[in-house]
Amino acid sequence: SSSLAGRAMRERRGGVTAPAPGEAEAGSGVDGDQDGSEGAAMACPLVGDAGVRGAVVVTRRPGRAAFSAADVEMAEQLATHAAVALELADRRADEERVAILEDRPRIARDLHDHVIQRIFAIGLTLDSVAERSDGAHGAASDAPAVREILGRAVEDLDETIRQIRASIFELQE
Protein backbone atom coordinates (compact mmCIF):
# COMPACT_ATOMS: atom_id res chain seq x y z
CA SER A 1 0.00 0.00 0.00
CA SER A 2 1.25 3.51 -0.77
CA SER A 3 -0.47 5.01 2.27
CA LEU A 4 1.47 6.25 5.25
CA ALA A 5 0.16 3.35 7.35
CA GLY A 6 1.05 0.84 4.61
CA ARG A 7 4.57 2.24 4.38
CA ALA A 8 5.00 2.11 8.18
CA MET A 9 3.86 -1.52 8.25
CA ARG A 10 6.07 -2.49 5.32
CA GLU A 11 9.16 -0.74 6.73
CA ARG A 12 8.33 -1.73 10.34
CA ARG A 13 9.06 1.76 11.64
CA GLY A 14 7.19 4.99 12.22
CA GLY A 15 6.79 7.56 9.49
CA VAL A 16 5.46 11.09 9.20
CA THR A 17 4.03 13.34 6.54
CA ALA A 18 3.57 17.06 6.52
CA PRO A 19 1.52 18.74 3.81
CA ALA A 20 3.57 20.74 1.38
CA PRO A 21 2.75 24.43 1.17
CA GLY A 22 -0.51 24.77 -0.72
CA GLU A 23 -1.53 21.12 -0.10
CA ALA A 24 -3.34 22.01 3.09
CA GLU A 25 -6.13 23.53 1.03
CA ALA A 26 -6.39 20.57 -1.40
CA GLY A 27 -5.94 17.61 0.95
CA SER A 28 -8.07 14.50 1.35
CA GLY A 29 -9.72 15.30 4.67
CA VAL A 30 -7.83 12.65 6.70
CA ASP A 31 -8.63 14.39 10.00
CA GLY A 32 -12.34 14.71 9.28
CA ASP A 33 -12.44 18.43 8.53
CA GLN A 34 -15.35 19.37 6.32
CA ASP A 35 -13.25 21.54 4.03
CA GLY A 36 -11.02 18.62 2.95
CA SER A 37 -7.79 20.03 4.39
CA GLU A 38 -5.37 17.93 6.39
CA GLY A 39 -2.42 18.49 8.64
CA ALA A 40 0.63 16.46 9.53
CA ALA A 41 0.20 12.70 9.97
CA MET A 42 2.19 9.97 11.69
CA ALA A 43 1.87 6.18 11.45
CA CYS A 44 3.58 3.58 13.61
CA PRO A 45 3.35 -0.17 12.99
CA LEU A 46 2.01 -2.64 15.55
CA VAL A 47 4.88 -5.13 15.39
CA GLY A 48 5.07 -8.22 17.57
CA ASP A 49 6.31 -11.79 17.51
CA ALA A 50 3.60 -12.73 15.03
CA GLY A 51 4.58 -9.93 12.64
CA VAL A 52 2.88 -6.66 11.77
CA ARG A 53 -0.76 -6.49 12.91
CA GLY A 54 -1.64 -3.01 11.71
CA ALA A 55 -0.67 0.58 12.40
CA VAL A 56 -1.54 3.43 14.73
CA VAL A 57 -2.20 6.61 12.76
CA VAL A 58 -2.27 10.06 14.34
CA THR A 59 -3.07 13.30 12.53
CA ARG A 60 -2.96 16.97 13.39
CA ARG A 61 -5.24 19.72 12.19
CA PRO A 62 -3.93 21.99 9.46
CA GLY A 63 -1.70 24.74 10.72
CA ARG A 64 -0.41 22.72 13.68
CA ALA A 65 3.25 21.84 14.08
CA ALA A 66 4.67 18.80 12.30
CA PHE A 67 5.49 15.71 14.37
CA SER A 68 8.99 15.72 15.85
CA ALA A 69 11.38 12.79 16.16
CA ALA A 70 10.47 12.63 19.87
CA ASP A 71 6.76 12.41 18.93
CA VAL A 72 7.51 9.53 16.57
CA GLU A 73 9.65 7.74 19.19
CA MET A 74 6.88 8.07 21.81
CA ALA A 75 4.25 6.84 19.33
CA GLU A 76 6.47 3.88 18.35
CA GLN A 77 6.74 2.94 22.04
CA LEU A 78 2.96 3.20 22.39
CA ALA A 79 2.51 1.03 19.29
CA THR A 80 4.97 -1.53 20.68
CA HIS A 81 3.05 -1.67 23.98
CA ALA A 82 -0.25 -2.01 22.10
CA ALA A 83 1.18 -4.85 19.97
CA VAL A 84 2.40 -6.65 23.11
CA ALA A 85 -1.03 -6.21 24.74
CA LEU A 86 -2.74 -7.63 21.64
CA GLU A 87 -0.38 -10.63 21.63
CA LEU A 88 -0.98 -11.24 25.35
CA ALA A 89 -4.74 -11.14 24.77
CA ASP A 90 -4.36 -13.61 21.91
CA ARG A 91 -2.24 -15.95 24.04
CA ARG A 92 -4.74 -15.83 26.92
CA ALA A 93 -7.57 -16.64 24.53
CA ASP A 94 -5.50 -19.54 23.14
CA GLU A 95 -4.82 -20.82 26.67
CA GLU A 96 -8.53 -20.70 27.50
CA ARG A 97 -9.36 -22.66 24.34
CA VAL A 98 -6.70 -25.28 25.22
CA ALA A 99 -8.03 -25.56 28.79
CA ILE A 100 -11.54 -26.17 27.47
CA LEU A 101 -10.28 -28.76 25.00
CA GLU A 102 -8.31 -30.50 27.76
CA ASP A 103 -11.34 -30.41 30.07
CA ARG A 104 -13.72 -32.05 27.59
CA PRO A 105 -12.50 -35.63 28.19
CA ARG A 106 -13.06 -35.16 31.94
CA ILE A 107 -16.56 -33.83 31.32
CA ALA A 108 -17.28 -36.74 28.99
CA ARG A 109 -16.09 -39.18 31.70
CA ASP A 110 -18.30 -37.41 34.27
CA LEU A 111 -21.28 -37.65 31.97
CA HIS A 112 -20.59 -41.33 31.37
CA ASP A 113 -19.72 -42.27 34.94
CA HIS A 114 -22.51 -40.41 36.69
CA VAL A 115 -25.26 -39.27 34.41
CA ILE A 116 -25.53 -42.22 32.03
CA GLN A 117 -25.35 -44.70 34.91
CA ARG A 118 -28.10 -42.82 36.77
CA ILE A 119 -30.34 -42.80 33.72
CA PHE A 120 -29.75 -46.54 33.26
CA ALA A 121 -30.64 -47.18 36.93
CA ILE A 122 -33.80 -45.10 36.62
CA GLY A 123 -34.75 -47.13 33.54
CA LEU A 124 -34.34 -50.37 35.51
CA THR A 125 -36.52 -48.94 38.29
CA LEU A 126 -39.23 -48.00 35.84
CA ASP A 127 -39.04 -51.49 34.29
CA SER A 128 -39.66 -53.01 37.72
CA VAL A 129 -42.65 -50.73 38.24
CA ALA A 130 -44.03 -51.78 34.88
CA GLU A 131 -43.66 -55.45 35.81
CA ARG A 132 -45.30 -54.82 39.18
CA SER A 133 -48.24 -53.05 37.59
CA ASP A 134 -48.64 -55.83 34.99
CA GLY A 135 -48.88 -58.46 37.70
CA ALA A 136 -51.26 -56.43 39.85
CA HIS A 137 -54.08 -56.22 37.28
CA GLY A 138 -55.58 -53.22 38.96
CA ALA A 139 -54.88 -54.20 42.53
CA ALA A 140 -55.29 -51.05 44.58
CA SER A 141 -52.95 -52.32 47.31
CA ASP A 142 -49.86 -51.78 45.07
CA ALA A 143 -50.85 -48.26 43.99
CA PRO A 144 -49.11 -46.41 46.88
CA ALA A 145 -45.89 -48.39 46.37
CA VAL A 146 -45.96 -47.74 42.63
CA ARG A 147 -46.54 -43.99 43.24
CA GLU A 148 -43.60 -43.91 45.66
CA ILE A 149 -41.27 -45.65 43.19
CA LEU A 150 -42.38 -43.36 40.37
CA GLY A 151 -41.87 -40.30 42.62
CA ARG A 152 -38.30 -41.40 43.40
CA ALA A 153 -37.65 -42.00 39.69
CA VAL A 154 -38.87 -38.48 38.86
CA GLU A 155 -36.62 -37.01 41.60
CA ASP A 156 -33.67 -39.00 40.24
CA LEU A 157 -34.39 -37.74 36.74
CA ASP A 158 -34.54 -34.14 38.04
CA GLU A 159 -31.14 -34.56 39.71
CA THR A 160 -29.72 -36.12 36.55
CA ILE A 161 -30.99 -33.16 34.51
CA ARG A 162 -29.26 -30.79 36.96
CA GLN A 163 -25.99 -32.71 36.50
CA ILE A 164 -26.29 -32.56 32.72
CA ARG A 165 -26.94 -28.81 32.87
CA ALA A 166 -23.91 -28.31 35.13
CA SER A 167 -21.74 -30.23 32.69
CA ILE A 168 -23.04 -28.21 29.76
CA PHE A 169 -22.42 -24.93 31.58
CA GLU A 170 -18.84 -26.06 32.28
CA LEU A 171 -18.37 -26.62 28.55
CA GLN A 172 -19.74 -23.16 27.73
CA GLU A 173 -17.54 -21.24 30.16
Image: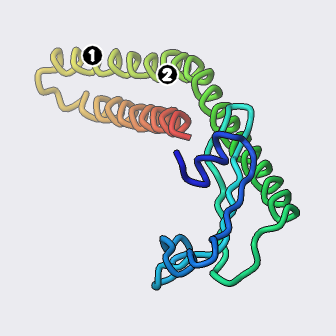
Front residue of 42/56: it is 42
Relative horizontal placement of residue 77, taking residue 40 as reference (left or right): right
Q: Quadrant of residue 160?
A: top left
Q: Nearer the viewer, mark 1 or mark 2?
A: 2
Q: Which residue is located at x 72 percent, y 82 percent?
A: 64
Position above or below: 63 against 42:
below
Which residue ends up furthest to the left in the rendered image?
137
The residue labelled by disc 1 is 127
Q: Callout 1, which amino acid?
A: Asp
In percent of width and height, residue 120 lies at 38, 16
Q: Callout 2, which amino acid?
A: Leu
Relative horizontal placement of residue 137, taking residue 66 as reference (left or right): left
- Gap between marks 1 and 2 measured at Cα: 23 Å
Front residue of 84/132: it is 84
Q: Quadrant of the C terminus?
A: top right
Total marks placed: 2
In percent of width and height, residue 32 lies at 51, 77
Q: Residues within 10 Å of mark 1 (few under 14, many from 20)?
A: few
Q: Secondary structure at mark 1?
A: helix
In percent of width and height, residue 164 lies at 46, 32
The residue labelled by disc 2 is 111
Q: Which residue is located at x 46 percent, y 84 percent?
A: 34
In percent of width and height, residue 2 lies at 54, 48
Q: Residues within 10 Å of mark 2 (few under 14, many from 20)?
A: some
Q: Secondary structure at mark 2?
A: helix
- The coloring applied to the image is rainbow
Front residue of 50/89: it is 50
Mark identifier at residue 63: none
